[in-house]
Image (tube, helix red, strand yellow):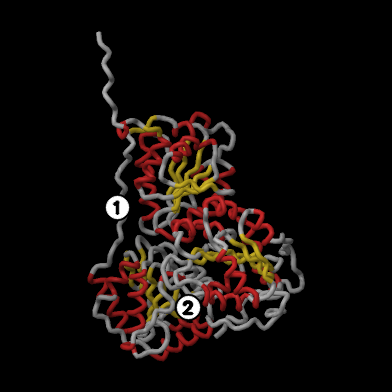
């Protein structure tokens, strides 16, 4: 009998392993990068990534990987993806999950797990995935059925993006990953709802605006676009309604949108500052004095309200997708809607609020004073020993491109960029709203990879920088380009400031011993330079930017200077 050749099999119909199918589904979901530290518990996923168009960004610590994924989610709206191994790897990534949860940012964390048969036997690096992450993630799921791999990924992406965004944790047992899972095509990505307000809800809000004399808008949350931000600011300026931003949501709207001559007002639009740590006193007064406060994408939470002490009893409208999670105090109207979309509906209504123009003008004038850099009056600032950060911010205001992305972690160093650097486009800020240290450098790496044509600058304290500064190696290895300003004052300045208030003259546990950060950067193959005078900063910044490398400018700051000169206006 003659040999008969077997029928060719369409590659798309060949069963893939669960690990390879996870990768195929991530491709279908539009994921462009995964960040992670490799582990033997998810080797099959790594093998699937070998031939994938998805870039595998190899980081130096799982905390860095998680923060990069969070930054990608913040900047693009699509969940950033991190992959880590069981036990210790998952523990290191926990900080990013907590940050994504409190910040309401979409993110996926894949965690390699021990083989199914070894569960409950104190196996090597065994831990309880749900027990660890169940209180700080939107969903925690373990893939026990290899044929469900694509469906689980699709559902988790949908959960991470829907309603109030957040992190989803997916456990992937190493033995399940190698089992046959099905055809390579995966499943169709699930549509994400962007709920809109009903006409009756818009009309009710219009009536509230028209009754109010001192209406105030507070913006925050994710997915603001150039169109939604600009349209809100034009509408608010036209009707003399001040707009504040939630803590570290400063890029939701443009800060200096020019008023058209038809508005009859001088100034640069309706943006009057931010709430939360480092806010101006004028912003707090606005929250106290408003007779109507409309929260768009931002619940009235702890930081925004100065520890649940401000604005809790004013007439309140809350616009959030889903429910009112995270909001405290009065709610007179709740609209379950996607805030940026809601704005586009609002500005097309016939609303004609008759707001207090004098109140509006005073707020804008106070904001202008608050954000105009003035030299620091204490210490040796302006000399040849220390760098005055206020002067540095004045230079950056002139040097940065309009769509530059700013990143920072947590600490007193963040007070300067938050106060002085304006944002003119969406997705131009990545900073942890939960106050996590160590985020600035990983966020700068992710921002450069996500937006290779945009300028990226990270402002880091010496304590914050070294928590994930090793990700400079990731930047060098993957072609990320940014300028990191490392502010060296030799201490954990935020805690030292609290000590000086509560325990004067008794500093304890806050002193830092630092390396030569510029030499350290050069050892990685990056650009490094030390600056000891603000007079030298502009040219040093230009050299760093022109290097085409990830760059570190080591700024020596007066240890006695804790913050910009004053917070009161």
| Numbered disc 1: secondary structure | loop
Question: How far from the left and from the top, in percent, is residue 461?
Answer: 63, 65
Question: How far from the left and from the top, in percent, is residue 522?
Answer: 65, 57
Could you tell whether 463 is left or right of 504 in the image? left
Question: How far from the left and from the top, in percent, is residue 300?
Answer: 44, 70
**Quarter in which the N terminus is drawn:** top left
Looking at this view, is 308 or 320 the one in front? 320
- Which numbered tag is attached to residue 191? 1
Name the residue beneath numbered marker 2.
273
Numbered disc total: 2
Does residue 372 appear in this view? yes
As drawn, 63 above or below 487: above
**Quarter of the rendering containing residue 381:** bottom right
Tell me which residue sits at (46%, 59%) in the image.
Answer: 452
Tell me which residue sits at (61%, 73%) in the image.
Answer: 539
Does residue 433 appear in this view? no
Question: How far from the left and from the top, in percent, is residue 313?
Answer: 43, 77
Q: Residues within 10 Å of mark 2 (few under 14, many from 20)?
A: many
Q: Residues within 10 Å of mark 1 (few under 14, many from 20)?
A: few
**Quarter of the rendering containing residue 380:** bottom right
**Quarter of the rendering containing residue 315:** bottom left
| Numbered disc 2: secondary structure | strand
Tell me which residue sits at (37%, 75%) in the image.
Answer: 294
Mark 2 to mark 1 CA distance (whole Å): 35 Å
**Quarter in which the C terminus is drawn:** bottom right
């Amino acid at each position: 009998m003659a040999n008969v050749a077997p029928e060719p099999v369409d590659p798309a119909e060949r069963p893939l392993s669960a690990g390879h199918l996870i990768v195929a589904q991530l491709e279908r979901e539009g994921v462009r990068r995964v960040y992670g530290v490799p582990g033997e518990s998810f080797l099959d996923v790594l093998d699937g990534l070998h031939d994938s168009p998805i870039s595998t960004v190899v980081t130096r610590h799982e905390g860095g990987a998680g923060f990069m994924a969070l930054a990608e989610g913040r900047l693009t709206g699509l969940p950033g993806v991190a992959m880590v191994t069981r036990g210790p790897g998952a523990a290191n990534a926990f900080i990013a999950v907590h940050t994504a949860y409190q910040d309401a940012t979409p993110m996926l964390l894949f965690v390699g797990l021990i083989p199914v048969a070894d569960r409950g036997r104190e196996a090597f690096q065994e831990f309880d995935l749900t027990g660890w992450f169940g209180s700080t993630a939107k969903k925690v799921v373990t893939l026990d059925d290899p044929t469900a791999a694509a469906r689980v990924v699709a559902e988790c992406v949908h959960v991470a993006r829907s309603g109030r965004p957040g992190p989803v944790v997916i456990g992937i047992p190493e033995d399940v990953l190698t089992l046959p899972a099905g055809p390579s095509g995966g499943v169709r990505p699930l549509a994400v709802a962007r709920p809109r307000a009903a006409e009756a809800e818009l009309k009710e809000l219009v009536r509230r605006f028209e009754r109010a004399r001192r209406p105030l808008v507070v913006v925050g949350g994710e997915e603001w676009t150039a169109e939604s931000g600009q349209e809100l600011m034009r509408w608010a300026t036209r009707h003399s309604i001040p707009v504040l931003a939630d803590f570290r949501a400063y890029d939701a709207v443009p800060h200096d949108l020019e008023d058209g001559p038809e508005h009859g007002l001088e100034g640069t639009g309706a943006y009057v500052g931010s709430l939360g740590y480092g806010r101006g006193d004028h912003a707090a007064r606005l929250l106290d004095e408003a007779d109507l406060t409309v929260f768009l994408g931002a619940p009235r939470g702890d930081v925004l309200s100065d520890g649940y002490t401000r604005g809790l009893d004013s007439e309140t409208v809350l616009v959030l997708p889903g429910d009112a999670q995270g909001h405290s105090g009065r709610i007179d109207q709740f609209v379950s809607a996607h805030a940026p979309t809601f704005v586009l509906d609002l500005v097309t209504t016939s609303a004609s609020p008759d707001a207090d123009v004098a109140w509006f003008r005073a707020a804008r004038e106070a904001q202008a004073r608050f954000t105009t850099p003035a030299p620091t009056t204490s210490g040796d600032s302006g000399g040849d020993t220390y760098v005055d950060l206020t002067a540095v911010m004045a230079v950056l205001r002139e040097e940065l491109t309009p769509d530059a992305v700013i990143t920072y972690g947590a600490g007193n160093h963040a007070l300067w960029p938050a106060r002085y650097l304006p944002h003119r486009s969406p997705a131009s800020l990545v900073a942890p709203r939960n106050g996590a240290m160590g985020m600035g450098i990983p966020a700068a790496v992710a921002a450069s990879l996500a937006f290779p044509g945009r300028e990226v600058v990270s402002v880091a304290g010496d304590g914050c920088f070294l928590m994930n500064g090793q990700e400079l190696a990731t930047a060098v290895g993957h072609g990320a380009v940014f300028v990191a300003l490392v502010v060296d004052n030799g201490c954990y300045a935020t805690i030292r400031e609290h000590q000086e208030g509560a325990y004067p003259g008794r500093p304890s546990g806050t002193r830092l011993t630092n390396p030569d950060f510029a030499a350290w950067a050069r050892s990685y193959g990056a650009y490094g330079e030390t600056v000891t005078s603000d007079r030298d900063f502009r040219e040093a910044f230009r050299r760093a930017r022109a290097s085409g490398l990830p760059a570190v400018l080591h700024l020596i700051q007066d240890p006695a200077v804790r913050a910009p000169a004053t917070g009161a206006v």
